[in-house]
Amino acid sequence: MQSIKYKVALYNSEEGYSVSCPGLPGCWSQGKTEEEAIINIQAAIQEYLAVIADLVPNGQLREVDVLV
């Protein structure tokens, strides 16, 4: 297993924090604290990527390095 970094956007609200991953459309989570929201978005990103892998069962997924 490898580590990949994703940028996330954190929003403070009356209920706590919501967090999205702009690079993965529709990938959102939340938490009562900033720390909880970050932990929850990590799990949401893992689940999102697992679904993507399931959507291309006959294709070959590749990863590329991109310098930013």
Image (cartoon, rainbow, N blue to C red):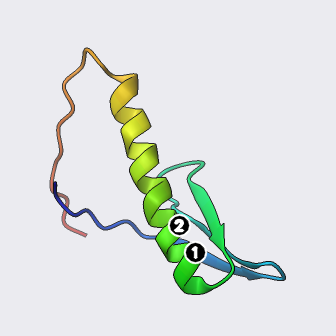
Q: Residue at x 69, y 80 (%)?
A: 32
- Is residue 51 depicted above or below 48 in this figure? above
Q: Residue at x 21, y 32 (%)?
A: 61
Q: Quadrant of the N terminus?
A: bottom left
Instruction: Check whether the beta carbons of the residues at disc 1 and disc 2 lie within 8 A of each other.
Output: yes
User: Visible in this render: residue 23?
Assistant: no
- Is residue 39 depicted above or below 35 in this figure? above
The part of the image, by quadrant, that contains residue 9 is bottom right
Q: Residue at x 61, y 58 (%)?
A: 28
Q: Relative to 24, is 20 on the left or the right?
A: right
Q: Residue at x 68, y 78 (%)?
A: 11
Label 1 environment density (alpha carbons within 10 Å; few <14, some 14–19, many ≥20): many
Question: Which residue lies under the disc numbered 1?
Answer: 37
Give amino acid for label 2: Asn
Q: Relative to 63, is 53 on the left or the right?
A: right
Q: Quadrant of the C terminus?
A: bottom left
> What element does badge 1 sit on?
helix
Percent coordinates x, y for residue 4 in the rendering: 26, 62
- Is residue 43 depicted above or below 14 in this figure? above
Out of 39 and 53, give the one closest to the viewer: 39
Give amino acid for label 1: Ala
Q: CA distance from mark 1 to mark 2?
A: 5 Å
Q: How many marks?
A: 2
Label 2 environment density (alpha carbons within 10 Å; few <14, some 14–19, many ≥20): some
Question: Which residue lies under the disc numbered 2?
Answer: 40
User: Visible in this render: residue 25?
Assistant: yes
Q: Relative to 24, is 50 on the left or the right?
A: left
Percent coordinates x, y for residue 25 in the rendering: 55, 48
